[in-house]
């Protein structure tokens, strides 16, 4: 191992954002060793990484971040120099059904990783990094104006966002208390290929494919700020290599949309791609019971990462949605595999209420 070689543990690398990040690091940093640690929950899928699984610098480790002893052995036997932590329970609706799972994985699992990094790097913290991937949802809900900055006070309102807020606080506590070299980023809603179809965009695409109703919560007036997933992983790459330790960065898409506008955009694009008469898919839209505690609006002020590093989103939503829809249409087997069995149980339970 050369002195400069990194041995990077990426957690949650079989999930949506994680798989894009693992691919980028494996391809762009052939001299570094990339260890993808994932428990392969319903959201983790090694099919996402088929194209790079035989790369010499890629290693997969099936493990649960809730198991501290296993993590210690993994740090030890693989001489881990850096961590990029994405593993999490990530769906708000599931957190409303089962908050305990979110508290365990997102808070205690993160604590386990922090303990391992602190103890394994204790002789010399310099040169290591613990990068924590978080969400804008920790800041709570905005009114009709304004945007979250890195100074916005935390005000999480769902069990998911509360658990991510707890993990963010713990990461920063390890920076101040043990001098662990941490970086935190808080990002807005991602979209793109490989996203599990419980989340809005792939759910709508999948339902249009199957001519199922399109459930829009409440009146569809909640606003999210959408970012192309590959722009998020480009930002993580940049911050991981360039940001000063102890810093926090907000990452956002500069792309606010009400849910109903976004769903209608997907409907129209799908009609075009499937050769349907315009308006066909819109007829499937149904306004359904609202999510309890549904945050009204998220918007990110990303001027810090823009000013410090020149990062900005590269893809407009129209192009990104079109590419996303093409990917799902070309990967119906992937969609079929992840939506069989347990997914349909979840779907029927959640949407029958
Ligand atoms: P995802 O649900 O698609 O993937 C999560 C991955 O973590 C899966 O591969 C799963 O198997 C793994 N995992 C879950 N529990 C685990 C455990 N106990 N041990 C090991 N692995 C486990 O999530 P995502 O959308 O890719 O999000 C990744 C990270 O980014 C999360 O931390 C999330 O909070 C954050 N984030 C997501 C978004 C978004 O829009 N999706 C936006 C901002 C931040
Ligand atoms: P989601 O993709 O679950 O992301 P998040 O809740 O983390 O922002 O939901 C995005 C928005 O879409 C959110 O306002 C809830 C809404 N939504 C629906 O209207 N219908 C649905 O079936 C789902 C899953 C979400």
Image: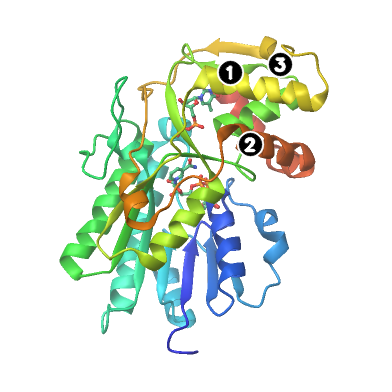
Mark 2 Cα within 10 Å, few/some/many (few <14, many 20+)? Answer: few
Instruction: Say if disc 1 is inside 8 Å of ligand 2.
Output: yes
Q: What is the C-alpha distance between the residues marked 3 and 1?
A: 12 Å
| Residue 215 marker | 1
Whether residue 304 sits left or right of residue 85 in the image: it is: left
Q: What is the C-alpha distance between the residues marked 1 and 2?
A: 24 Å
> Which label sits in the foreground, 1 or 2?
2
Secondary structure beneath label 1: strand
Please, which residue is most extreme toward the left here? 177
Could you say which quadrant of the image residue 47 lies in? bottom right
Secondary structure beneath label 2: helix
Instruction: Say if disc 2 is inside 8 Å of ligand 1.
Output: no
Which of the marked residues, 2 or 3, is nearer the chain's N terminus? 3
Query: 48 or 150: which is nearer to us?
Result: 150
Image spot of residue 74 (x, y percent): 47, 74
| Residue 281 marker | 3
Q: What is the C-alpha distance between the residues marked 2 and 3?
A: 19 Å
Whether residue 44 sits left or right of residue 308 in the image: it is: right
Tell me the residue at 64%/52% (across/down). 45
Which of the marked residues, 1 or 2, is nearer the chain's N terminus? 1
Secondary structure beneath label 3: helix
Tell me the residue at 77%/36% (across/down). 329
Q: Which residue is mark 2?
A: 319
Image spot of residue 198 (x, y percent): 58, 33
Query: 302 or 125: which is nearer to us?
Result: 302
Tell me the residue at 32%/19% (across/down). 144
> Which label sits in the foreground, 2 or 3?
2
Mark 1 Cα within 10 Å, few/some/many (few <14, many 20+)? Answer: many
């Amino acid at each position: 191992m050369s002195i400069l070689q990194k041995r990077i543990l990426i957690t949650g690398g079989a999930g949506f954002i994680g798989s894009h990040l693992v691919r980028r690091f494996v391809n762009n940093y052939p001299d570094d060793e990339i260890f993808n640690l994932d428990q392969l929950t319903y959201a983790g899928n090694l099919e996402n990484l088929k194209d790079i699984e035989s790369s010499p610098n890629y290693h997969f480790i099936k493990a649960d971040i809730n198991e501290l002893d296993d993590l210690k052995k993994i740090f030890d036997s693989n001489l881990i120099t850096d961590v990029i932590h994405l593993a999490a329970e990530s769906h708000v609706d599931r957190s409303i059904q089962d908050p305990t799972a979110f508290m365990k994985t997102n808070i205690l699992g993160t604590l386990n990783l922090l303990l391992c990094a602190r103890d394994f790097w204790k002789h010399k913290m310099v040169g290591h990094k613990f990068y924590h991937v978080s969400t804008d949802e920790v800041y709570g809900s905005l009114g009709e104006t304004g945007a979250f900055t890195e100074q916005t006070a935390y005000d999480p309102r769902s069990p998911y966002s509360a658990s991510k807020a707890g993990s963010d606080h713990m990461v920063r506590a390890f920076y101040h208390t043990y001098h662990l070299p941490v970086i935190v980023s808080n990002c807005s809603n991602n979209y793109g290929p490989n996203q599990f179809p419980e989340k809005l965009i792939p759910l709508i695409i999948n339902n249009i494919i199957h001519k199922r109703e399109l459930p829009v919560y409440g009146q569809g007036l909640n606003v999210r700020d959408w970012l192309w997933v590959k722009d998020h992983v480009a930002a993580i790459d940049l911050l991981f290599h360039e940001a000063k330790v102890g810093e926090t960065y907000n990452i956002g898409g500069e792309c606010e949309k009400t849910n109903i506008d976004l769903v209608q955009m997907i409907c129209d694009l799908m009609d075009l791609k499937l050769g349907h008469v315009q308006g066909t898919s819109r007829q499937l839209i149904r306004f359904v019971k609202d999510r309890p505690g549904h945050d009204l609006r998220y918007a990110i002020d990303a001027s810090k990462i823009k000013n410090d590093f020149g990062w900005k989103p590269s893809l407009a939503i129209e192009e990104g949605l079109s590419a996303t829809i093409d990917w799902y249409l070309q990967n119906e087997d992937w969609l079929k595999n992840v939506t069989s069995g347990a997914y349909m149980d979840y779907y029927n339970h959640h949407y029958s209420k």
